[in-house]
């Protein structure tokens, strides 16, 4: 069985490791301390590093992986819709909408026959069929933003470039199938979201929903 290990998720650093049932791994973003992340990586089984975009919370430790010869797929060498076919995996980059160039990844495990979508730091969600697992930016709650704005609170405007739980719910509601697993990631560090509310809202459209808390491990 494949698994996802979230080393961290949020504006203070993002990294997750996807591992198939034979131990082959993909590192998703590298914004968490290199030494800490390495405790979860088997470099003999690490197929590649996928970088969504060039913000430090997603790519800060890229140089460390370059120095040890890890294959890196990143905005400078990928194109939206151009398939990356490597041993054990097929990876489809998907153009997202952020304040810099950003990609999501649709990852297919050739070993476990599972399809995982990794979508973060965006205001747009691509249409994807038959996902087994969706990792989705769920950064803020529009109700909280509205309430804070009405009180003239000083807001961290980073939320403008991310998805709200309402947008995620609308997306799931518009699919013609139910995604088996949804993992809500990159939640606001500025108090713009309520984890319990997110779980309650998303669970109406998914039987197995989680918040990508530090060290969360999910089987797929």
Image (cartoon, grey):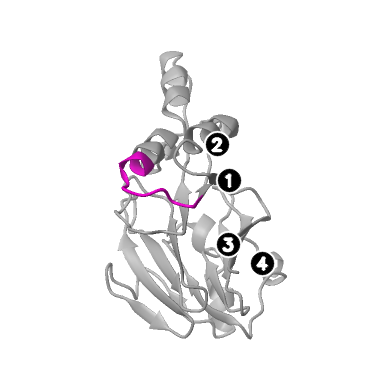
Residue shown at the point (54%, 74%) measured from the top left: 63
Up-down relation of residue 71 to residue 146 (above or below): below
Per the image, the residue denoted by label 3 is: 16
Dot 3: element: strand
What secondary structure is marked by label 2? helix
The first of marks 3 and 1 along the sequence is 3
Q: Residues within 10 Å of mark 4 (few under 14, many from 20)?
A: some
Mark 3 vs mark 2: give the one in front: 2
Could you tell which of marks 3 and 2 lies nearer the N-terminus? 3
Residue behind mark 1: 210
- Measured in 3D between alpha carbons, the distance from the residue under mark 4 to the one under mark 2, in whole angstroms, is 27 Å
| Left or right: where 211 falls relative to 94 | right
> Quick check: marks 2 and 1 in contact, CB under 8 Å?
yes
- Circle 2: is it few (<14), some (14-19), or many (20+) Cα within 10 Å? some
Q: Earlier in the sequence, mark 1 or mark 4?
A: 4
**In the rendered image, which quarter contains the C terminus?**
bottom right
Question: Quick one: 67 or 195, which is closer to the camera?
Answer: 195
Percent position of residue 170, x then y: 35, 37
180 in the magenta segment: yes
Q: Which residue is mark 2?
A: 199
The percent coordinates of residue 121 (x first, y second) are: 42, 50
Mark 1 vs mark 4: in front: 1
Tell me the CA gap for discs 1 and 4. Answer: 21 Å
Q: Nearer the viewer, residue 18 or 79?
A: 18
Q: CA distance from mark 3 to mark 1?
A: 14 Å
Q: Earlier in the sequence, mark 2 or mark 1?
A: 2
Residue 190, image x, y percentages: 55, 34
Please give the label number shown on residue 37: 4
């Amino acid at each position: 069985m494949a698994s996802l290990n979230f080393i961290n998720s949020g504006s203070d650093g993002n990294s997750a490791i996807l591992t198939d049932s034979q131990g082959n791994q993909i590192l998703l973003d590298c914004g968490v301390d290199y030494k800490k992340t390495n405790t979860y990586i088997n470099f003999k089984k690490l197929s590649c590093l996928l970088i969504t975009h060039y913000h430090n919370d997603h790519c800060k430790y890229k140089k460390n992986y370059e120095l040890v010869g890890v294959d890196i797929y990143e905005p400078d060498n990928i194109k939206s819709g151009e398939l990356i076919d490597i041993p054990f995996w097929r990876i489809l980059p998907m153009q997202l909408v952020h304040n810099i160039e950003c990609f999501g990844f649709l990852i297919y495990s050739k070993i476990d026959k599972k399809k995982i979508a990794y979508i973060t730091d965006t205001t747009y969600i691509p249409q994807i069929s038959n996902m087994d697992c969706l990792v989705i930016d769920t950064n803020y709650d529009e109700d909280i933003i509205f309430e804070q704005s009405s009180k003239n609170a000083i807001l961290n405007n980073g939320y403008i470039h991310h998805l709200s739980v309402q947008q995620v719910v609308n997306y799931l509601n518009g699919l013609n199938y139910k995604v088996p697993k949804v993992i809500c990631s990159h939640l606001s560090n500025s108090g713009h979201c309520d984890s319990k509310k997110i779980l309650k809202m998303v669970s109406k459209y998914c039987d197995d929903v989680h918040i990508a808390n530090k060290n969360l491990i999910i089987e797929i």
